[in-house]
């Protein structure tokens, strides 16, 4: 069981950051981050998420041109913004990732199942990315305000990958946090049947 400090880091004190300190996130940190998030559960172990860690000034500028006006400064300032993509041909990796069954046959030719599985499971892997980042001392600023077609053209052209969402990663600037917004109560959001 995690102690209160760990729970605060992952949940209670964790915030969505919009401003960033001028501190580097190293490639070693990003590799460690992936080493944690790769254990996210996915259907048939399909692991459809693909990650582009946007770090260089040129790449950050390219991505900033693909996001909504309110998100451009966040992307430009963040030391890293990861594009969480979804590989629409993820099922081709199933013989490697799920060798006990012919899981590839479940998906091949079923575009609706491919799309829903890729979206749902890459979103789950993206959530693990956020938790893993928090666990290793990084802050996150997930965003969905971007032009998917522009991001796909700029970062995934010629591939079977499409953008799902983006998330800035780094060391958040606490002074730029907004007051914490309320959440729904258990009774508002849940039902036990």
Image (cartoon, rainbow, N blue to C red):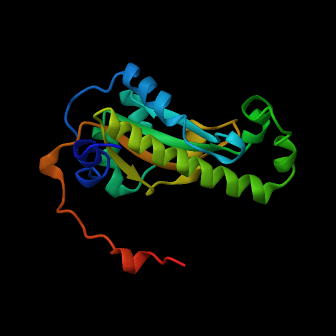
Of residues 122 and 63, the one drawn nearer to the viewer in this rendering: 122
Q: Nearer the viewer, residue 21 or 13?
A: 13
Residue 153 at x, y percent in the picture: 60, 42
Image height of 138 relative to 41, above or below: above
The residue most toward the top is: 28
Where is the C terminus found, in terms of image quarters? Answer: bottom right
Left-right relation of 105 to 92: right
| Residue farthest along the left direction in this orientation | 175
Residue shown at 72% from the left, 32% from the top? 97
The residue that appears at 30% across and 36% down in the rendered structure is 138
Report which quarter residue 69 is drawn in.
bottom left
* Residue 27 in view (yes/no): yes
The residue located at (68%, 48%) in the rendering is 43
Q: Is residue 65 visible?
A: no
Which is more toward the observer, 63 or 89?
Answer: 89
How many marks on residues?
0
Q: Which residue lies most toward the front here?
A: 1
Question: Looking at the image, is 142 positioned above or below residue 79?
Answer: below
Q: Position of residue 33 (x, y in %)?
A: 43, 30
How far across and how far down the image is residue 128, in percent? 47, 44
| Rendering coords of residue 124 (x, y %) | 54, 50
Quadrant for the N terminus, please.
top left
Residue 99 lies in quadrant: top right
Residue depicted at 51% across the width and 54% down the height: 147
């Amino acid at each position: 069981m995690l102690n209160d400090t760990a729970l605060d880091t992952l949940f209670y004190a964790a915030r969505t950051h919009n401003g960033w300190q001028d501190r580097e996130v190293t490639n070693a940190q990003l590799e460690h981050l992936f080493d944690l998030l790769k254990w996210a559960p996915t259907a048939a172990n399909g692991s459809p998420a693909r990650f582009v860690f946007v770090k260089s000034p040129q790449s950050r500028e390219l991505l900033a041109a693909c996001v909504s006006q309110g998100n451009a400064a966040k992307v430009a300032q963040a030391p890293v913004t990861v594009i969480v993509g979804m590989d629409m041909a993820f099922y081709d990796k199933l013989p490697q990732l799920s060798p006990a069954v012919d899981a590839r046959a479940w998906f091949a030719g079923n575009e609706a199942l491919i799309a829903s599985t890729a979206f749902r499971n890459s979103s789950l892997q993206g959530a693990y990315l956020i938790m893993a980042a928090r666990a290793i001392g990084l802050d996150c600023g997930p965003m969905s305000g971007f032009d998917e077609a522009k991001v796909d053209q700029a970062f995934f052209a010629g591939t079977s990958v499409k953008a799902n969402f983006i998330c800035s990663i780094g060391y958040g600037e606490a002074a730029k946090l907004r007051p914490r917004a309320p959440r729904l109560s258990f009774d508002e959001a849940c039902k036990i049947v």
